[in-house]
């Protein structure tokens, strides 16, 4: 199918953007100078490939992102897109350097007594390797002497095998430092709801969009996400309390443990000798997500703010420079402390004011329409909603405390979307009438309402082309207006799929992150097997299966009963209906459905049919399930 031509902005969109920009009362912006400061070098060709020659990172597609913003991009978001495009090796301060613009995140290196301490080695092995090559070319060929993971999101550990191999780690006993419970959270977030998160992430990060004025601009948090090989090496040192100290390659590091902040497992840390503070991803040059649109557990805005206040109290007056896991550093003690306070006040404000209005009886949608920052707080560039937004973050605070139900009985047990849509369309006089009225709303610039009503038409009749085309046009205008990178990407991806259809999956999804299967615990594997189990197909099973992992000597028993798959809490002492013997990696394959009982590595004794029934009832997930249509 040929690519549809995008629309230009309407007068209503142009007016909305102008009104927003005129309402901004922002102070002096030193961001461009700070983002350029300390530049040393970058790649001659800003493209990174894997060993097979496939491009995993390509900055050349953003070559036209200079000058004034096009009319199809919110100027405030265009500002952030240009700032994120500064790429290469930068000096932060004496002995601290960063690779920026080689992925959505930053990789930081600190020169120790004998080598490099590497902090947050990006998403992809290939990008981390390219970053280390640039570092060694310009700073010297030193070995890696320590690795620090600031937190449990994949863009801060996935490239570790491009920095150090498991064999090097075993030979040299290099410390790999991470906050407590890192491994559990690093893996579990990508497993249990992984297929759904990855599909929604395609929308959030605009994976199918073409970079340019009518398409992809930025994530807000960084340029884009790389698409290379993801790896994970388990930590050897754990940080579980604030004030904990380590000596890494001759440098003292003082840690602040910040669980349930931007990530469930996260930490900040300070280098006293260098007067440098790493705030991980707990602060950034934009409003972050209290709820991320790809889907994840709601973050604790109150605790998040408190950790930032605490960091200022612990380290603020001992810090000359602050570096972070995204964006550029903040220079000067006074600027660092002001930045920390402004970010903490932002998260505390949206937390407290959401609950104030909730306690007056307002629902989350009503609160989102009412809350605005005080003039001083809203005049801070780093508090702009380039990634998270005030509107969806206050909804997240509401949900954390009060859940999805707003207390109105009409919303307690609504029809599911298709059935509700059919009824809405019938009540509104049929699809043709809704489309006709929507054209008037579109002409008036009420794109939010067009999206609301035409979504019902699509869910009542996904083949209604007139509705699809007009809804795509409305999403497009909403995307052009958005200051948030993820909001723009969601709208424009929705428009694309309305016009071209939901993309067909190249293969069935397994939920298994490349390079991460070795980090899955047995309980996680069983949990994922249980998630794949369709109780409609296997709900009558009442069986037990003994499992022996031949290469690790692990033994455990599975119970399948009442539509539930679980690990037996006590050993069943040889009375299981069937027995499986297989290597650990083969059990991973069974859990994810990439092999079956016929695989040569699997030995099944006893009643083979019960094991076959269990795995036959386990589903695969479609990685391209529909979002904008039923």
Image (tube, rainbow, N blue to C red):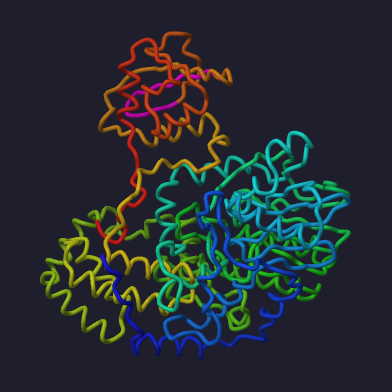
Q: Is residue 548 left or right of residue 597?
A: right
Is residue 169 depicted above or below 246 in this figure? above
Taking depth in this image into account, of 483 and 175 the one nearest to the observer is: 175
Residue pictured at 47% horizontal, 27% vertical: 586
Q: Is residue 466 left or right of residue 589?
A: left
Residue 484: x and y in percent read 49, 72
Is residue 102 depicted above or below 592 in this figure? below
Taking depth in this image into account, of 168 and 480 the one nearest to the observer is: 168
* Residue 567 belongs to magenta span: no
Residue pictured at 68% horizontal, 50% vertical: 149
Residue pictured at 50% horizontal, 52% vertical: 297
Residue 454 sits in quarter: bottom left
Residue 80: x and y in percent read 57, 76
Residue 8: x and y in percent read 35, 84
On-image quarter of the C terminus:
bottom left
Is residue 376 depicted above or below 420 in this figure? below
Residue 520: x and y in percent read 54, 35
Which contiguous range is marked in magenta?
555-566
């Amino acid at each position: 199918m040929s690519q549809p031509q995008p629309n230009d902005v309407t007068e209503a969109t142009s007016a909305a953007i102008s009104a927003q920009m005129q309402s901004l009362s922002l102070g002096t912006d030193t961001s461009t100078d700070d983002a350029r400061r300390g530049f040393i070098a970058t790649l001659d060709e800003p493209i990174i490939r894997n060993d097979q020659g496939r491009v995993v990172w390509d900055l050349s597609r953003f070559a036209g992102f200079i000058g004034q913003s096009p009319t199809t991009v919110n100027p405030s978001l265009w500002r952030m897109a240009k700032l994120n495009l500064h790429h290469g090796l930068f000096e932060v301060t004496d002995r601290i350097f960063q690779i920026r613009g080689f992925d959505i995140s930053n990789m930081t290196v600190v020169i120790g007594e004998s080598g490099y301490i590497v902090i947050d080695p990006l998403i992809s092995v290939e990008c981390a390797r390219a970053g280390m090559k640039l570092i060694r070319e310009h700073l010297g060929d030193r070995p890696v002497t320590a690795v620090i993971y600031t937190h449990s999101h994949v863009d801060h550990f996935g490239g570790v095998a491009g920095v150090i191999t498991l064999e090097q780690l075993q030979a040299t006993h290099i410390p790999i430092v991470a906050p407590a419970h890192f491994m559990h959270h690093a893996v579990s977030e990508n497993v249990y709801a992984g297929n759904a998160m990855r599909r929604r992430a395609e929308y959030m990060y605009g994976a199918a969009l073409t970079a340019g004025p009518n398409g992809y601009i930025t994530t807000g948090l960084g340029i884009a996400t790389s698409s290379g090989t993801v790896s994970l090496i388990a930590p050897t040192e754990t940080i579980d309390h604030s004030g904990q100290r380590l000596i890494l390659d001759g440098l003292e590091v003082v840690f602040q443990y910040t669980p349930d902040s931007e990530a469930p497992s996260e930490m900040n840390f300070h280098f006293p000798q260098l007067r440098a503070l790493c705030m991980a991803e707990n602060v950034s040059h934009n409003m972050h997500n209290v709820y991320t649109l790809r889907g994840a557990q709601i973050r604790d805005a109150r605790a998040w703010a408190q950790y930032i206040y605490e960091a200022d109290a612990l380290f603020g007056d001992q810090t000359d420079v602050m570096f972070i896991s995204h964006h550029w550093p903040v220079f000067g003690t006074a600027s660092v402390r002001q930045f920390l306070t402004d970010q903490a006040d932002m998260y505390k404000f949206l937390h407290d004011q959401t609950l104030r209005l909730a306690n007056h009886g307002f629902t989350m949608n009503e609160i989102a329409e009412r809350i605005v920052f005080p003039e001083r707080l809203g005049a801070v560039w780093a508090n702009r909603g380039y990634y998270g937004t005030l509107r969806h973050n206050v909804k997240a605070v509401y949900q954390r405390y009060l859940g999805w139900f707003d207390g109105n009985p009409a919303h307690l047990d609504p029809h599911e979307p298709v059935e509700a849509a059919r009824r809405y369309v019938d009540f509104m006089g049929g699809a043709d009438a809704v489309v006709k009225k929507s054209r008037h709303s579109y002409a008036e610039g009420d794109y939010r309402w067009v999206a609301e009503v035409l979504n019902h038409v699509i869910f009542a009749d996904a083949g209604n082309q007139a509705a699809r085309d007009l809804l795509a046009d409305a999403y497009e205008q909403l995307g052009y207006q958005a200051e948030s990178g993820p909001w723009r990407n969601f709208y424009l991806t929705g428009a694309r799929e309305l016009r071209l259809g939901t993309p067909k999956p190249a293969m069935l999804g397994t939920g298994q992150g490349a390079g991460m299967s070795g980090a899955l615990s047995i309980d996680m594997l069983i949990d994922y097997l249980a998630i794949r189990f369709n109780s409609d197909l296997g709900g009558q099973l009442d069986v037990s299966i003994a499992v022996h992992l031949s290469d690790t000597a692990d033994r455990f028993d599975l119970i399948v009963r009442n539509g539930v798959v679980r690990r037996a809490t006590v050993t069943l002492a040889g009375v299981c209906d069937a027995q499986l013997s297989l290597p650990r990696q083969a059990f991973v394959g069974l859990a994810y459905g990439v092999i079956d009982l016929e695989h040569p590595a699997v030995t099944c004794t006893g009643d083979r049919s019960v094991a076959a029934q269990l795995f036959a009832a386990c589903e695969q997930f479609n990685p391209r399930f529909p979002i904008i249509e039923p």
